[in-house]
């Protein structure tokens, strides 16, 4: 009996292990690649650049001006801190300049946190901002195709599609799905997972009974203003950048040192693997807050060495 059940269990495991749709995060920009490196007027000042993919394997074949495929990376506040130049295109790419395929981890009214899981590289996270007017509800733990653009230092999302439906449409196996844009998500019916969609519920074709009028209610009070961030601990007299605090621990960059030090801090932020938070203060001070002192020290040494 056990021997008969084993193949069925193995088939079920194989079904669960089907490879996911390859994730990617791509930014298409005009630029120029020379022997000295890559430049584009669209990239923000201080953004790190390196070669990867086809351009990394054979840079001579991608030299010159044109449209390039870039792989972006962001910091904890959604600022573009690095791009990897992967390919010089033969012609401009159709569609939006930002195209992201990934798993949505978190969404609120301002930002989206997306996990990118490439098939042949380490997973990473992107912090994307919502474009003005894009307020549609998105479901965490679902895969989406996100489309948008680079504006200043940040990547903005303007519309989305369920990734699986979009891929099937590109293969010609189904019509192109409706976009999720504005305040409308045609795939969200306000139900919890596991419940049948609205059109499949009992009595879906019947006329619902009239509801009794509800008493008028006063509008809810406005939400309280967000509290000011906790000020950083002071640095020793005369010091404008350095580690401080007794838990959590802080890297503090005073306003007079931001221009020299902060671009370097942003460039190395992806290397700080411990949970951390980036803070900006009205006086121009910036800080990185982390609960692991040893990890912060090791990371700060790398920043100082450059």
Image (cartoon, rainbow, N blue to C red):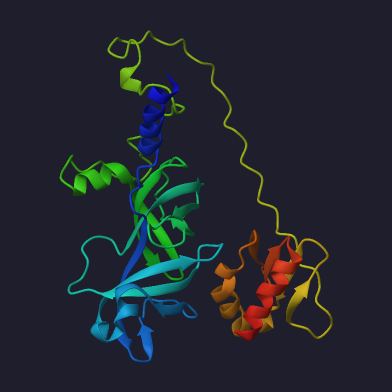
Q: Quadrant of the C terminus?
A: bottom right
Along the line of sight, which residue is nearer the eye, 76 or 129?
76
Quarter of the image where one finds residue 72: bottom left
Q: Examine the rendering and report whether any part of residue 162 can be seen.
A: no
Q: Residue at x 72, y 73 (%)?
A: 297
Report which quarter residue 131 is drawn in: bottom left
Q: Is residue 25 above or below residue 30?
A: above
- Residue 15 at x, y percent in the picture: 35, 36
39, 274: nearer the viewer: 274
| Residue 290 appearing in the image | yes
Residue 161's x, y, as percent?
A: 32, 46
Q: The N terminus is located in which quarter? A: top left
Q: Is residue 298 above or below residue 3?
A: below
Is residue 95 rendered to the left or right of residue 84?
left
118 in relation to 160, above or below: below
Residue plotted at (54% across, 16% down):
215
Q: Position of residue 134 (x, y in %)?
A: 39, 49
């Amino acid at each position: 009996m056990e021997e008969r059940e084993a193949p069925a269990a193995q088939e079920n495991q194989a079904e669960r292990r089907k490879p996911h749709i390859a994730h990617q995060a791509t930014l298409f920009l005009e630029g120029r690649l020379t022997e000295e490196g890559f430049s584009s007027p669209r990239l923000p000042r201080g953004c790190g650049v390196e070669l990867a993919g086809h351009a990394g394997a054979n840079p001579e074949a991608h030299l010159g001006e044109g449209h390039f495929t870039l792989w972006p990376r962001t910091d904890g506040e959604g600022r573009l801190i690095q791009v990897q130049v992967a390919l010089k295109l033969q012609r401009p790419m159709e569609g939006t300049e930002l195209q992201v395929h990934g798993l949505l981890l978190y969404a609120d009214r301002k930002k989206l946190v997306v996990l990118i899981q490439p098939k042949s590289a380490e997973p990473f996270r992107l912090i994307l901002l919502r474009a003005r007017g894009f307020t549609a509800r998105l479901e965490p733990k679902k895969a989406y195709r996100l489309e948008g653009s680079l504006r200043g230092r940040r990547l903005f999302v303007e519309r989305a599609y369920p990734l699986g439906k979009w891929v099937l449409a590109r293969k010609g196996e189904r019509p192109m799905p409706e976009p999720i844009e504005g305040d409308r998500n045609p795939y969200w019916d306000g139900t919890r997972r596991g419940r049948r969609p609205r059109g499949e519920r009992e009595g879906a074709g019947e006329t619902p009974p009239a509801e009794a009028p509800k008493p008028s209610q006063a509008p809810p009070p406005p939400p309280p203003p967000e509290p000011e961030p906790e000020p950083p601990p002071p640095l020793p007299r005369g010091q404008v950048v350095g580690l401080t605090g007794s838990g959590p621990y802080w890297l503090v960059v005073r306003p007079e040192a931001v221009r020299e030090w902060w671009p370097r801090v942003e460039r190395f932020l992806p290397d700080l693997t411990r949970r951390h938070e980036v803070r900006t203060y009205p006086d121009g001070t910036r800080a990185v807050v982390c609960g692991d002192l040893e990890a912060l020290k090791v990371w700060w040494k790398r920043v100082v060495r450059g």
